[in-house]
C-alpha cells in the first residue's frame, strides 16, 4: 500500500492527537515530543474517536474519551478495559516536513 500523507510536522503540537481521514482510512495521529504515532481512529470497544481522548505521554498510550480504555501507541493493544481487541497501527515516517503513514 502506498504512503498516506497526513500533515506537516508543525500541524501537531507535542502532546496533541488529531484525526485525519485519508485514502479511506480514519487515522489518529499523536505527537509526543518529536515522535509521531498513528493508529486507527476507532476504539475497538465502541466506535468512538481515539483522537478526542487524552494522550498519556509517559505511558505512550491514548485513552478513549467515552469509556476510558487505553491503547498502546506502539502496538495498538488495549491496556485497560472495557476494550479487549487491539486497533490497527501504522508505520510513521517523516519525509522532509511531511508526516506520512503506511498500514502495517
Image: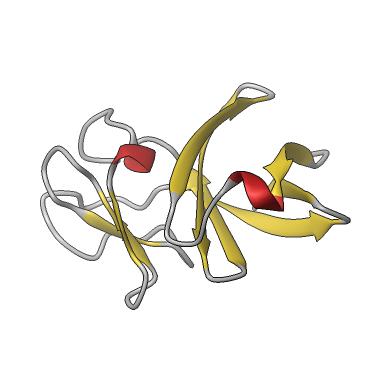
Asked if residue 32 lies left or right of residue 80, the reply is: right
86 or 57: nearer the viewer? 57
Count the marks: how many? 0
Asked if residue 13 lies left or right of residue 81, the reply is: right
Q: Is residue 101 above or below residue 81?
A: above
Residue at position x 12%, y 56% in the image: 81
- Which quadrant of the figure has residue 3? top right
User: Coloring scheme of the render?
Assistant: secondary structure
Q: Give the image location of residue 8, x and y in percent.
A: 73, 45
Residue at position x 54%, y 71% in the image: 33
Q: Give the image location of residue 102, x and y in percent.
A: 72, 47
Image quadrant where one finds the N terminus: top right
Q: Which residue lies most toward the right here? A: 96
Asked if residue 61 lies left or right of residue 22, the reply is: left
Asked if residue 60 lies left or right of residue 101, the reply is: left
Q: Which residue lies most toward the bottom here? A: 58
Q: Is residue 72 above or below residue 43?
A: below
Q: Give the image location of residue 62, x and y in percent.
A: 32, 56
Q: Is residue 23 above or below residue 97?
A: above
Residue at position x 49%, y 48% in the image: 39
Residue at position x 86%, y 55% in the image: 95
Q: Give the image location of residue 72, x and y in percent.
A: 37, 64
Amino acid at each position: 500500500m502506498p504512503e498516506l500523507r497526513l500533515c506537516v510536522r508543525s500541524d501537531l503540537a507535542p502532546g496533541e492527537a488529531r484525526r485525519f481521514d485519508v485514502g479511506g482510512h480514519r487515522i489518529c495521529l499523536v505527537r509526543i515530543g518529536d515522535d509521531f504515532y498513528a493508529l486507527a481512529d476507532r476504539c475497538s470497544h465502541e466506535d468512538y474517536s481515539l483522537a478526542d481522548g487524552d494522550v498519556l505521554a509517559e505511558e505512550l498510550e491514548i485513552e478513549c474519551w467515552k469509556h476510558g480504555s487505553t491503547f498502546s501507541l506502539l502496538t495498538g493493544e488495549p491496556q485497560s478495559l472495557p476494550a479487549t481487541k487491539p486497533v490497527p497501527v501504522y508505520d510513521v515516517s517523516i519525509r522532509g516536513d511531511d508526516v506520512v503513514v503506511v498500514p502495517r
